[in-house]
Image (tube, rainbow, N blue to C red):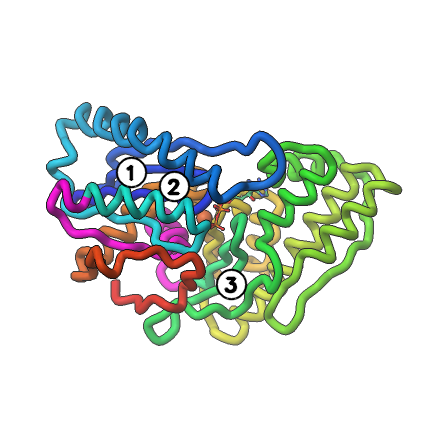
Amino acid sequence: MLVLGIEGTAWNLSAAVVSDEGEVAEVSHTYVPKEGGIHPREAAQHHSEHMPRILEQLCECMAQKGLSLRDVDGVAFSQGPGLGPALRTVATAARTLSMMLEVPLVGVNHCLAHIEIGKWDTGAHDPMVVYASGANTQILALSKGRYRVFGETIDIGLGNALDKFARAIGMSHPGGPKIEQLARKANSYVPLPYTVKGMDLAFSGLITAAKNATREHPIEDVCFSLQEHAFAMLVEVSERAIAHTGKEEVLLVGGVGANERLSEMMRIMCTERGIAYHRPKKRYLGDNGTMIAILGMRMLKHGITTPIERSEVIAGYRPDMVEVVW
Ligand code: ATP
Ligand code: FE2
């Protein structure tokens, strides 16, 4: 089976084709705002401008392997969560391709796609998932046919929080990797707010305090301390979720998962508890078309398709809204 997947919930527009053996081709293009944060309409504009070229390049990659769009058995797309205008642009392209190629359309939940590619790439079987990306931060695991959210951010996603702090001190997007580099050069620890409420997390207060701390402390020390606080909060909630559910694996996914310090802290927690720790390759942590195609293929193989009349985008699509039958 060959499935085409398109991702475009936020910054990154990416189209990929996967087969039963794995990835066949992937082509991506990222929107970088001139200043400030992401503008939903600008992201949509970016996606619609780049869609034709991305698909052309994907066809060229397929041709090198003796394949064409006509060989595709289904078209999967990110149905949500994400920015409405960006989602609609991707959905329109996916509907068009599905009708043109006369193959089924499959609307995919973006969060579940992050999880599925993580499992696919690492061989994780039934993990406690730590999903830390730009807009989302959730601790989830499969229970009674759905990925249940055991804990999550109650304000902003960890990646967006890091990006916000970085922007405030004059760094360009994305801030996460720059903060990680600066943190490596730190000499001391600055106490900052640590906000875990039950199983939930909040990052706004931490970011405000970190911004203020840059007036009195070296930037490297603030970056280091910001990471230590935010990641420790995430590890605490993950560990509690594991203790209650008895899961024996942790799977770290989402763009922030690229952070080596976060990965190290998760690994230490897993080693201390005697459970397995998994993290997919870097290119599968951030948003990518392959993850949409992989989950699309799983769904298609279980007979799940999305009729055009039910293919409207779902900006607030939660992972626990989806029954997991694959
Ligand atoms: P979602 O829609 O799933 O919330 P997203 O579209 O915001 O995702 P991802 O590609 O999953 O994006 O993640 C992007 C985020 O990851 C950005 O906020 C970026 O700063 C952060 N990030 C990337 N690399 C690192 C790193 N090394 N350390 C910390 N954060 C990082
Ligand atoms: Fe994402």
**Is 9 on the left or on the right of 179, as rendered?**
left
Q: Does the magenta portion include 115?
A: yes
**Is 175 on the left or on the right of 68, as rendered?**
right
Disc 1 residue type (three-letter): Ala
Position of residue 229 measured from the top left corner of the image (x, y, whole percent)? 71, 54
Point out the stretch of residues depicted in magenta.
98-126
| Residue pointed to by mark 2 | 288
In this view of the protein, can residue 175 be seen by the observer?
A: yes
Question: Do tag 2 and tag 1 residues touch (Cβ < 8 Å)?
Answer: yes
CA–CA distance in space, label 2 to label 1? 8 Å
Estimate how packed mark 1 is, as few (under 14), some (14 to 19) or many (20 or more) residues with alpha carbons within 10 Å. Answer: many
Estimate how packed mark 3 is, as few (under 14), some (14 to 19) or many (20 or more) residues with alpha carbons within 10 Å. Answer: many
**Residue at (51%, 70%) from the top-left corner?**
150
* Mark 3 sits near ligand 1, with its Cβ under 8 Å away: no
**Is 209 on the left or on the right of 233, as rendered?**
right
Specify the farthest residue to the right.
216
**Residue at (16%, 35%) from the top-left corner?**
69
| Residue pointed to by mark 3 | 139
**Sequence-wise first label, 3 or 2:** 3
Up the image or down, 151 lies above or below 36; here it is below
| Residue pointed to by mark 1 | 16
Disc 3 residue type (three-letter): Ile
**Residue at (39%, 53%) from the top-left corner?**
110
**Sequence-wise first label, 3 or 1:** 1
Up the image or down, 58 lies above or below 115; here it is above
In this view of the protein, can residue 21 be seen by the observer?
A: no
